[in-house]
Amino acid sequence: MPMLLVISTSVSDDLVVAKNGLSLLPQSFTTYTYKFLLGNPAQLLRSYGVTMLVTSVGTIGGILISSLLGYALAHKGFKLRGFFVFVVVFTMLFNGGMVPTYLIVRGTLGLFDNIWALILPTMIIPLYIMMFRSNFASLPNEIMESAKIDGAGEWRLFFQIAFPLSRPWIATIGLMYILKYWNEWVPAM
């Protein structure tokens, strides 16, 4: 059913669809959309290239930052852990909304008309941080302690022990990041 709506809308006039809404049967049949796409293949390829770039950079950066934050929040020796867990959970409950996000991205960060405006605002997702936190908290303490005895620092513990042991979580959260970035169309407007 959704695919039929997409096909019907693709061969309908934009103004008629905006006025009357979606319909299973085409309204005011036109092939303008297909003429535009087939007449300008470079634009279509460039659009897919930008989408792939945003998706790949956002996914890799999001996994790296979220896993680092989750690891820090799972670390029992981190003194401000309770405060930062509260901040992460609080931002999960209360979202700023579209207008404040736009004002921050444009005004504070100065990312107007910049590809980073598509990547940075949603790179850190509180739910994914908490998922990584629960994963790292469930890792056996004995492995970490034995690595510390062997002289491993926190960075080595993370990148050589905790991160590789978290491959299923990385794959799952990575897939969610990919879907989020690929399906996002509002920020590009």
Image (tube, rainbow, N blue to C red):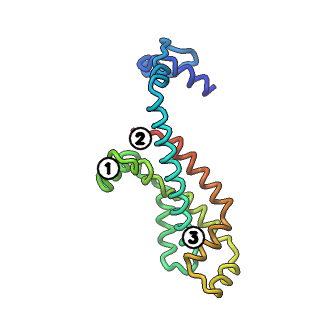
Residue 58 x, y percent position in the rendering? 50, 53
The kind of residue on which mark 3 rests is Tyr
- Per the model, the C-alpha gap separating discs 1 and 2 is 13 Å
At label 2, which amino acid type do we have?
Ala
- Compared with 47, 24 (above or below) is above
Which comes sooner in the sequence, label 1 or label 2?
1
Residue 2 image label:
none
Residues marked 3 and 2 touching at CB (< 8 Å): no
Outermost residue to the front:
42
Residue 7 is situated, as x and y percent measured from the top left of the image, at 57, 22
Question: What residue does disc 3 label?
Answer: 71
Instruction: Tell me residue 1's x, y (percent).
Output: 63, 25
| Proximity of marks 1 and 2: CB atoms separated by less than 8 Å | no
Residue at numbered disc 2: 188
Disc 1 versus disc 3: distance between alpha carbons? Answer: 31 Å
| Residue denoted by label 1 | 106
Q: Is residue 139 rendered to the left or right of residue 59?
A: right
Position of residue 174 measured from the top left corner of the image (x, y, whole percent): 60, 54
**First reached walking from the N terminus: tag 3 or tag 2:** 3
